Image: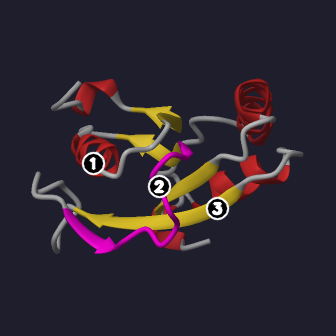
Amino acid sequence: MNTNYQGKLKVLYSRQEIEAAVARLAAEITREYQARNPLILGVLKGSFIFMSDLVRRLDFPLETDFVQLSSYGRGTNSSGKIKMAQDIRATVKGRDVLVVDDIVDTGNSLTFLEDYLKNKNPASLKFCCLLDKPSRRQVR
């Protein structure tokens, strides 16, 4: 642990709370998608640990892929200008797509991705996020 942060870090959610949330979400996803072979699309880099925990709990055929968006430039605050840093490789047209992200912050990135994916004509498009920061929301 970096000693510069000692005393300044605060645990927001325990490991048990996170595991329970992942289990609950996995159960929901299983009910929704178990017979549909969905494309599970992770938003890099933040989603990769959450998505791996989630996908390990899903026991049905699925495909995974990742997309990377950039909106932060050199700082830690969103610039509001979204760029595609890494595009999706999987076919979206006619597929059930579930986008997985770690945190909904301003909402700009997910709105950009929603519009982008809708133009690829998926059969369905839904989002699964572990955390929500409504105080920072700029869209929807």
Residue at left offset 17%, top offset 59%:
82
Question: Nearer the N terminus, badge 1 or badge 2?
Answer: 2
**Please, is residue 15 above or below residue 20 in the view?**
below
Q: What residue is shown with label 1?
A: 119
Which mark, by number, is residue 92? 2
- At x 32%, y 40%, the residue is 105
Q: Residues within 10 Å of mark 1 (few under 14, many from 20)?
A: few
The spot of residue 117 in percent (x, y) is 34, 49
Quadrant holding the N terminus: bottom right
Which of discs 1 and 3 lies nearer the camera? The answer is: 1
Q: Is residue 59 magenta?
A: no
Q: Which mark is residue 39?
A: none
Magenta segment, which residues? 83-97
Element marked by disc 1: loop
Badge 1 amino acid: Asn
Identify whether 84 is placed above or below 43.
Answer: below
**Magenta-colored stretch includes residue 90:** yes
Q: Nearer the viewer, residue 118 or 27?
A: 118
Q: Badge 2, how many Cα within 10 Å: few under 14, some, many 20+?
A: many
Estimate the spatial distance between the alpha carbons at disc 1 and disc 2, rounded to whole Å: 10 Å
Which type of secondary structure does the marked residue at label 3 adopt?
strand
**Which amino acid, mark 3?**
Thr
Q: Position of residue 28 (x, y in %)?
A: 73, 25
Q: Residue at x 17, y 54 (%)?
A: 78
Give the left or right position of residue 21, taking residue 94 as reference: right
* Residue 17 in which image quadrant: top right
Q: CA distance from mark 2 to mark 3?
A: 11 Å
Residues under labels 1 and 3: Cα distance?
19 Å
Tell me the chief SS of the magenta region: loop
Residue at label 3?
Answer: 64
When asked about the image quadrant of residue 111, the answer is: top left
Tell how many labels.
3
